[in-house]
Amino acid sequence: MEKKNNFGMGTKIGYGIGDLGGNLVSAAAGAFVTMYYTDSVLLSAAFIGTMMLFTRLLDGISDIIMGIIIDKTYTKYGKARPWVLFSAFPLILSFILMLNVPSGLSDTATKIYVVVTYIFYSVICFTAVNGAYSTLVTLICPNPEERTGFTSARSFCSSLAMLLAQSYSVALMARFGGGQKGFTAMSIIYGVIALICILITGLTCKEYKITTKAEMENKNSSSLIQDVKLLFSSKYTFLTLIAFVFTWFMLTGSGGASVYFVRDVLQDMSLMAPLSMAGTLPSLIILALGIVPKAAKRYGKRNTLMMGAGFLMFGYTVISLFPYQLPVIFAGMICKGIGVGLSTSLLFATTSDVADYINIKNHVTVTGLTHSLTGFGVKVGVGLGSASLGWILAIGNYSAEAANSGMAQSAGALFAERACYSIVPLICAAILMGSAVFLDVEKQLEKLKAEE
């Protein structure tokens, strides 16, 4: 059964607003969970980094499982949409639990609580919501060009969520007393907002084609092993995965390091909001003006993605070279914002093209499985960004005691914070550029459709 959809701005906003909710909690977690665990819960940075990387390895398994589940789901509401709706509540619960570690626990009990709640949030709940949400765009809109509008709306809302989380979370927590009270208030407020946003997407976005189980059984279906082999037989699968991993490695590492960089290197927490705005507002403007779909239509998705990677590389380069010069840092953050605006929405749109390419070429349905790589890449990138932050801070001998007492960090710790804020993200941006050069799936998909 196929349904006609009105792909107006309201439909696209209805889809995009889901990522406002999802990224509000994930951006807050990415920016503050490491500091919460090191400075409030008083766990070692090395332990936190190792736990986060281990969690991302589990994420790889859960993302693939979720992709398979979506492909095998048959309801009157579609494949992905039901999971967006039903997974929203557990996600918010897990987010609140993660940022509210009970006081009075022994060191071992504290570590167990942290590991269990972090895995519950990341491996189970976020996987379910993000996997279904990412797949939904392909099932909403069959037109590759039209999808860029949906993914641009998604990236706009995602960037807005990151701006809110990074710019106002510190003030919000301080308003409620700071410390654990601040984290509790933030987790509940952000959780309620996120729940409403995700439910709006689930309730308003309808899949254009509902395939029943009987219809699927009448088709020539491949086995799970065959689907996985077909998925990974395409070079575009690996290129897209690499692009997602290092893009979110870059964003998470830089975002998580920002509070350390502003507090310890620049020694002025009042710069947190302005710097976040400088790095986010350009992205919001680009996406709001519809520049990305227009650029992708004129220059192609790959070339536009390469432009975005170029802006990212330039922005992080100037920050790395002049880490104490505020005008240069702001200029670098503006370039970073432009790069994010050009690249992130195109990565999601390209994933849909990869799914279509594999489906048409091999006469299979691996849409959910393909989009599971999106979630896998995002979470591995987030895990590497968070883990590298913990490890590099540990190598630099970062001291939570010095931070809590208002003392200055050592030279090694300050360099570690600078490295996490700009040097490591620069390397990630360069890898994104390298993968984008070979990511010509849009052109190959057009040829494949012409041959049909």
Image: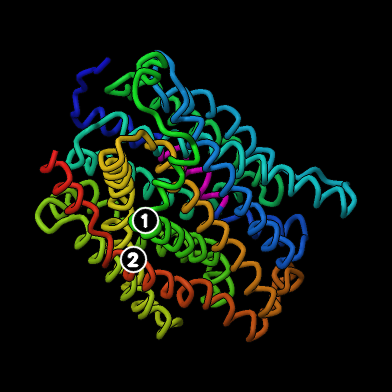
Q: Position of residue 368 (x, y in %)?
A: 42, 36
Q: Which mark is residue 435?
A: 2
> Is 381 contained in the magenta span?
no
Q: Quadrant of the C terminus?
A: top left
142 sits left or right of 232 in the view: left
Q: Which mark is residue 171?
A: none
Label 2, label 1: how many angstroms apart (C-alpha)?
Answer: 8 Å
Q: Position of residue 98 (x, y in %)?
A: 68, 43
Q: Secondary structure at mark 1?
A: helix
For marks 2 and 1 on the same chain, the one whose residue lies earlier in the sequence: 1
Which residue type does callout 2 highlight? Ser
Q: Which residues are magenta?
A: 19-29
Q: Which mark is residue 240?
A: 1
**Residue drawn at the location 21% of the way across and 55% of the way down:** 301
Please report contact status of discs 2 and 1: CB closer than 8 Å, yes or no: yes
233 sits left or right of 28 in the view: left
Toward which corner of the image does residue 395 lie, by quadrant? bottom right
**Nearest the camera: 226 or 22?**
226
Q: Quadrant of the N terminus?
A: top left
Mark 2: give few (<14), some (14-19) or many (20+) Cα within 10 Å: many
**Residue drawn at the location 83% of the way across and 46% of the way down:** 103
